[in-house]
Image (spheres, rainbow, N blue to C red):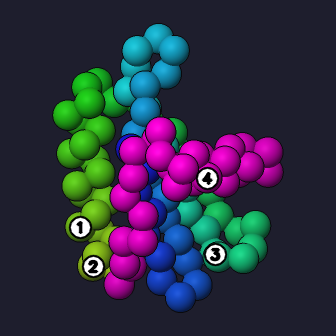
Amino acid sequence: MIVRWETDHDYVLVHIHQDMFGDWIFSRAWGQIGTQFGGLKHQLADTLEQAQMWLEDETTIQASRGFRKVLDVADNTPEGQEAMRQLSLLDLL
C-alpha cells in the first residue's frame, strides 16, 4: 500500500510492505517537491494491523497540517509501481 500527501511545496509518502522475511515495514519519505531536501525512515511493525494504525495516525497528522491525499494505491498498480520507483531513488541519495 502506498499513500502520498502533498501541499503546494511539500510531500509525505508512506509505503507499507512485507520484506522477504515476512516482516511488515512502514516506510515514510518526506521532502520538498522538486528538490532533494527530505528524508526516508523505515520502521518494523509487529503486525500489519500496527502498520495500518500508524498509517491512520499519519493520515490524521497530515490532514491537520493542511496536506491533501493525492495517491492511495496498491503496490501492483501502475501508479504504485511509479511511486515505488520514486521511493527507491531516495535510497540513492
Which residue is pictured at 28% across the width and 47% down the height?
54
Quadrant placement of the N terminus: top left
Check if mark 2's residue and mark 1's residue have beta carbons within 8 Å: yes
- Three-letter code, disc 3: Gln
Q: CA distance from mark 3 to mark 1?
A: 20 Å
**Location of residue 32 (image quadrant):** bottom right
- Three-letter code, disc 1: Thr
Position of 50 compared to 13: left or right? left
Where residue 72 appears, as percent x and y from the top left, is 37, 58
Q: CA distance from mark 2 to mark 1?
A: 6 Å
Where residue 65 appears, as percent x and y from the top left, is 35, 80
Residue 77 part of the magenta segment: yes
Question: Residue at label 1?
Answer: 60
**Location of residue 5 (image quadrant):** bottom left
Q: Residues within 10 Å of mark 2 (few under 14, many from 20)?
A: few
Check if mark 3's residue and mark 1's residue have beta carbons within 8 Å: no
First in residue order: circle 2 vs circle 4? 2
Tell me which segment is drawn in magenta: 66-93
Question: Residue at label 4?
Answer: 82
Q: CA distance from mark 4 to mark 1?
A: 25 Å
Question: Residue at label 3?
Answer: 32
Q: Residues within 10 Å of mark 4 (few under 14, many from 20)?
A: few
